[in-house]
Structure formats: C-alpha cells, structure tokens
C-alpha cells in the first residue's frame, strides 16, 4: 500500500483540479440565455432532437472492440512470458510460438472475412 | 556517498509523508508547466514552419500566451447543451484529466537524490508492473473521451467519441506489443529497472523495430496529427469536444498535452535510456548522478514533443480507413513477427549459435526499414486518384466546381466543345 500512496495523492490532486475547474467555470463565465445556443451544434434551422440514429452507432465499432479484447488478452499473455523469458528458456519460446500461431489463424480468418475493412 | 547508485525497487514506498507531498506537487507543477510550454512551443514552431510569426505579444517571446488563453477560457460562457446527459457531460473532462496526470506517477526522472537530507529516487513510485499500470491508466483515459462524445447529445460529438475510442484501442494493441521485446530484454516491467538495464545500450538501438512501432502508435494513441481523425475539422467539427466550452474544453486540451508528455516520457524511459546521459555527455564525471540527469531526461522529452509538433507541421491527415488499415494490417502483424524474431534470436544467442547481440541489430535494421516504408506506401497508395481529380479549367465557362470530380478525357473535350458552341 505504501507504494500506492503517491499515486492516490497525484490522482486526488488531479481530480480536485479538474472538479474545481468545472465548478469554477460556471461561476466566472457570463450567462446569457439563448435557446439556439443550447441546441446541438449543427447546421440547419432546427437542430435534430437527438444524435444520429438516436444514439445508436454502426456495429463496426463493436466488432473493433471485440477484436481489441482478443489482442489485448494476447498481449497480457505475452507480458509474463517476456519477463520470465530467461527462466522459461527454449520451452517458453516454443510454447509462445504455438500460441501466437493459434492466434494468427484467427487473425487471418478475420482478415479474409473482411473484419478489418473500413468502408 | 553510498547513495549515489541506481535505485532499486527497495527504494520505493519508504518516503516520509512530507516527501510524498513534495514529489506529488512537483510532478503536478512540472506537468502543468510543460503543457503551457508545449502549447506555446507548438504555436511558435508551426508558425515558423509556415513562415508566420506566431504568438509573441504576451510576456517575453509570447511565453505567457497559453496561460492567458486559459484565463480567457475561464471567462467564457459555460454551456451545457439541452440534449446532454448532465452529470456524465460534466464528469467526462475530469476523468480525462485525472487519468492523464496519474499515468506519470511511475516515470523515473532521475537517480537517487537528497531532498532535505533524505535520499530518495527522483520518481514518485515504482512497482514490479508499473508499465502495465501506465497502460491501464491510459485505457481509463479513453473513457473520458467516449463519455464526452456520448453525453453531449450531438451527432458530431458521438461520431468523434466513437472514432477516438476505436482509434485508441486499435493503436493500444500495437503499443502494448512493442513493449514485449523490451520486457524480454530487461526481464522486468518496472520503469526504474528498465532504465538500469539500458546502462550499456539503449533499447532504441537494440530493438529498433519496437521503437518505430511505439513511436508510430504513440502518435495515434494521443490523437495527434497526422492521426488526429477524431478532431478532423473538415468532417467532425471538433470531434468529441464539439459541445464543450469554457474551462471544460481547457481540461480536454490539458489532458491531450499531458498525454503527449506521458507517451514521450515513456518512450524516453523504455527506449532512450531514461535519465541516462546520451553518448558524448556520458563521459562527463557525475553526468548520471544527483540532479544532473534531469537535463538529459527533459532534453529527450522535449525532443519528442518537438517531433510531435514537426509531424503536425509537415504531414497531412490520413483517411480513417487508411489509418485503421495501417494499425490492424501492418503494425500488429509486424510487431507479432518481430517479437518472435527477438525471442528466437535471443535463444540462439544463449545457446551460442549466434555469437553476439550485434546479430540482432543486423536482423532488426531491415525490419525497421520495411516498417517505415510501409507507412510511406500506405500514405501514398491513393495518390493517382487525386491526380485524376484535376479537371481542366475551361476558358470561357462559369466557375462551376466539377460535380463528379473527374470526367474521362474524351468527355472533357466534348464539354469544352459544347461550351465553345454555346458561346459561338
């Protein structure tokens, strides 16, 4: 826990600074009511009542997020191996090679099926 | 004098409380000052590159410009759009800024120094997984952008927030993979020990492809030009912070620049030997002791900041699909391949099949070169199409912009003849 105190301190300081700025800016700035100014920033006479698609967004982004999780977990598997590389030796290298090849098969599949295309 | 040595993990967590307070305040103040300086430097340097003057009125050389901009922003109206999810809208910039600051807690600024008679490392804290901590905090920072985009209740903001998140998670993979080779060589994830491990040779030399991958993905990770797609003015107005005004906007700005400092500091620590003096200076006695290393550390840091500014002044923005393609189809496979090359080469060295580390550098150079080449190829790929877009200006016609951009050459001639006919 001793190691974490400086992080807690820095986090509290930064959070305090941010929260203070958000609060103080509502005091220091002028307030001139204007109906149009409170609308979403858009062109046109009347702003749309809600964002594009009612807050729904393309499924493409979910796909990217899922791919991210796959590779993120792969990354997390690689870290302990890299740190203990010397202890694991040749056995570790071969095991990691097999693991990477397994992931590469999935990666090649996603690529072939157009999962990495943006259009 | 026994304390003039490299800090180890045992040196952390034993500071008295007042020293922690001093260090925390020190890091905070240094970050804020660096941000103010970087904003000023960016405007001045980009101005020089564009043969302008840049801000030069407020204070000597205009140094106080960014401070004055901050004060001006504080005096602007603080708007909360009526579509906004109020609480999330207000908390998003705070999340962004908190995460940005916290990531710098594990960066080593220097070796052991004496502060009011207490010997302590010039670093807030360190533990055995501190690089992982930086990655974790950086991921929390993404929440700030996504929530800001979602809570604004505006189409531009929503799209900007989505783009930011997709971009940052994509490049975070490449970034994380580029660390693996460093961990493999250093045998640790603690920042101070990685710096110690680079006493003889910087990892930027030994693991050049990792360094290239990291520096590329750090630009994508911080949403800076040429990868500043979430804020592409021509497409998305301001991206996720379109609806933000006053100090809330300033907080996002601050977070962006602090992130720039963080990734630069991380690059310095992991690849450029951290606070260690670069070669010609490393011969000076005492160059790596006491407070001197602060010069080397901030020198390297500011060099990275300058590169960020230089990139912005030089390169045009990528298209979003080019950008994502580059991340997913080039950076990730290349980093995976490079990790395997490093692992196999190191095993061969240990089994004394290959003679020394120099072999790895020889292996690395072509890969790094290929990587750089692929960036260029990705950016140049679509250029012929742009050439085709140029339509001949017709001598006697109205200045109408071409609708479908390019007519085939024969049709252009026909069009010219038609115009001539109608005029004649």
Image (cartoon, coloured by chain):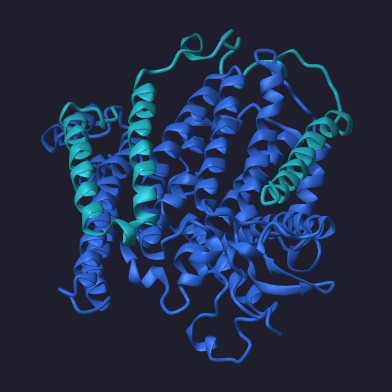
Chain colours: A cyan, B blue
Of residues A37 and A24, the one drawn nearer to the viewer in this rendering: A24
Question: Which corner quadrant of the image does residue A119 belong to?
Answer: top left
Res. B129 visible in picture: yes
Q: Give residue B361's quadrant in the image.
A: bottom left
Question: x and y percent of residue B269 in the render?
Answer: 52, 64
Look at 58% across and 72% down and name the residue there: B275
Q: Is residue B419 above or below residue B388?
A: above
Q: Is residue B278 left or right of residue B4?
A: left
> In this orientation, which residue lies closer to the viewer: A90 or B30?
A90
Where does the image place residue B144, in percent across and percent down from the top left?
60, 32
Residue B206 versus residue B35 in the image, above or below: below
Nearest the viewer among B122 and B294 is: B122
Horizontal placement of B185 versus A48: left or right? left
Residue B145 rendering spot, x and y as whole percentages: 57, 32
Q: Residue furthest left?
A: B410
Left or right relative to B377: residue B293? right
Query: Split into 4 quadrants, where in the image is the C terminus of chain B?
Result: top left
**In this rendering, position of residue B401 left or right of residue A98:** right
Taking the spot 25% from the left edge, 57% from the top edge, the residue there is: B338
Percent x, y of residue A99:
22, 42
* B164 lies above or below B113: above
Q: Find the residue positioned furthest to the right.
A: A27
């Amino acid at each position: 826990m001793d190691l974490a105190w400086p992080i807690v301190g820095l986090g509290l300081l930064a959070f305090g600074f941010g929260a203070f700025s958000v609060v103080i800016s509502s005091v220091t700035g002028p307030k001139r009511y204007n109906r149009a100014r409170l609308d979403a920033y858009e062109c046109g006479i009347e702003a749309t009542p809600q964002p594009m698609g009612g807050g729904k967004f393309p499924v493409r982004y979910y796909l990217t997020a899922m791919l991210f999780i796959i590779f993120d977990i792969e990354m997390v598997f690689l870290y302990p191996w890299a740190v203990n590389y010397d202890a694991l030796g040749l056995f570790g290298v071969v095991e990691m090679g097999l693991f990477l090849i397994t992931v590469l098969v999935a990666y090649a599949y996603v690529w072939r099926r157009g999962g990495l295309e943006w259009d | 004098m026994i304390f003039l040595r490299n800090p180890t993990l045992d040196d952390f967590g034993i500071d008295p409380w007042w020293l922690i307070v001093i260090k925390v305040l020190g890091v905070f103040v240094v970050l804020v000052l660096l941000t103010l300086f970087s904003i000023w430097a960016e405007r001045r340097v980009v101005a020089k590159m564009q043969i302008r003057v840049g801000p030069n009125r407020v204070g000597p050389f205009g140094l106080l410009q960014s401070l004055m901009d901050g004060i001006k922003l504080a005096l602007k109206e603080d708007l909360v759009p009526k579509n906004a999810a109020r609480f999330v809208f207000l908390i998003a910039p705070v999340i962004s800024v908190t995460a940005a600051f916290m990531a710098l807690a594990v960066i080593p600024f220097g070796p052991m120094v004496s502060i009011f008679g207490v010997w302590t490392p010039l670093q807030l804290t360190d533990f055995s997984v501190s690089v992982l901590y930086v990655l974790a905090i950086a991921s929390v920072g993404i929440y700030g952008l996504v929530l800001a985009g979602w809570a604004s209740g505006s189409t531009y903001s929503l799209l900007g927030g989505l783009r930011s998140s997709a971009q940052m998670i994509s490049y975070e993979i490449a970034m994380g993979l580029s660390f693996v080779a460093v961990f493999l060589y250093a045998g640790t994830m603690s920042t101070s020990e990685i710096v110690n491990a680079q006493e003889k040779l910087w990892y930027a030399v030994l693991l050049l492809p990792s360094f290239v991958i990291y520096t590329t993905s750090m630009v994508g990770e911080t949403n800076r030009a040429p990868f500043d797609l979430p804020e592409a003015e021509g497409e998305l107005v301001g991206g996720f912070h379109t609806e933000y005004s006053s100090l809330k906007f300033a907080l996002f700005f601050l977070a962006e620049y602090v992130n720039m400092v963080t990734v630069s500091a991380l690059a310095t620590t992991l690849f450029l030997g951290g606070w260690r003096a670069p070669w010609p200076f490393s011969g000076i006695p005492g160059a790596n002791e006491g407070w001197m290393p602060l010069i080397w550390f901030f020198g390297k840091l500011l060099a990275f900041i300058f590169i960020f500014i230089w990139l912005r002044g030089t390169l045009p923005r990528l298209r979003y699909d080019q950008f994502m393609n580059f991340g997913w189809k080039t950076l990730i496979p290349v980093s995976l391949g490079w990790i395997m090359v490093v692992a196999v080469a190191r095993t061969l060295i240990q089994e004394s099949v290959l003679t020394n580390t120099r072999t790895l550098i020889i292996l690395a150079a072509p890969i790094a070169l290929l990587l750089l080449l692929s960036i260029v190829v990705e950016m140049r790929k679509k250029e012929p199409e742009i050439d085709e877009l140029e339509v001949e200006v017709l001598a006697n016609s109205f200045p109408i912009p071409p609708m479908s951009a390019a007519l085939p050459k024969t049709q252009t001639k026909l069009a010219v003849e038609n115009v001539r006919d109608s005029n004649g």
